[in-house]
Image (cartoon, helix red, strand yellow):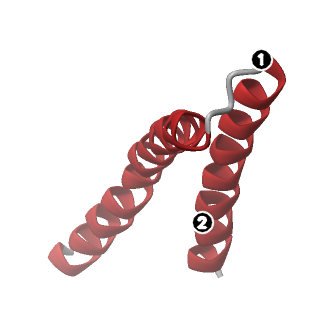
Amino acid sequence: MDKNKGNQLKKFAKYTTIGIQMAATIIGGYYLGGYLDQRYGYTEPFYEKWVGLAAVFLGVASVMWQVIKDSK
């Protein structure tokens, strides 16, 4: 009985960290986009929006890829 409970707890902990990891990756992508905007001097609103969004979506895609890989 204890072995089954420990296994369930391990699975629960594994999948609850996915949300935290996704949030951290999105926030990191947002700040990476802002950093790249400043570093390369993108001051036009078009580049500001799209570089930040690209960094966020790349972060989300990487987390989703990892979730799919881990769930197999």
Between marks 2 and 1 in the image, the one whose residue lies nearer the viewer: 1
How packed mark 2 is, by other alpha carbons closer than 10 Å (few <14, some 14-19, many 20 or more), is some
Residue at figure coordinates x 50%, y 44% from the top left: 32
Residue 35 locus on image (x, y percent) = 49, 39
Using the image, determine if residue 55 lies above or below residue 48. below
- Position of the N terminus, as image quadrant, is bottom left
- Residue 20 sits in quarter: top left
Disc number at residue 67?
2
Residue sticking out furthest to the right? 46
Left or right, 64 with respect to 50, comes to: left
Secondary structure beneath dot 1 equals: helix
Disc number at residue 45?
1
Residue at figure coordinates x 61%, y 43% from the top left: 40
Secondary structure beneath dot 2 equals: helix
Residue at figure coordinates x 16%, y 74% from the top left: 2
Residue 25 locus on image (x, y percent) = 49, 48
Q: Along the polypeptide, which appears first: circle 2 or circle 1?
A: 1
Using the image, determine if residue 66 lies above or below residue 50. below
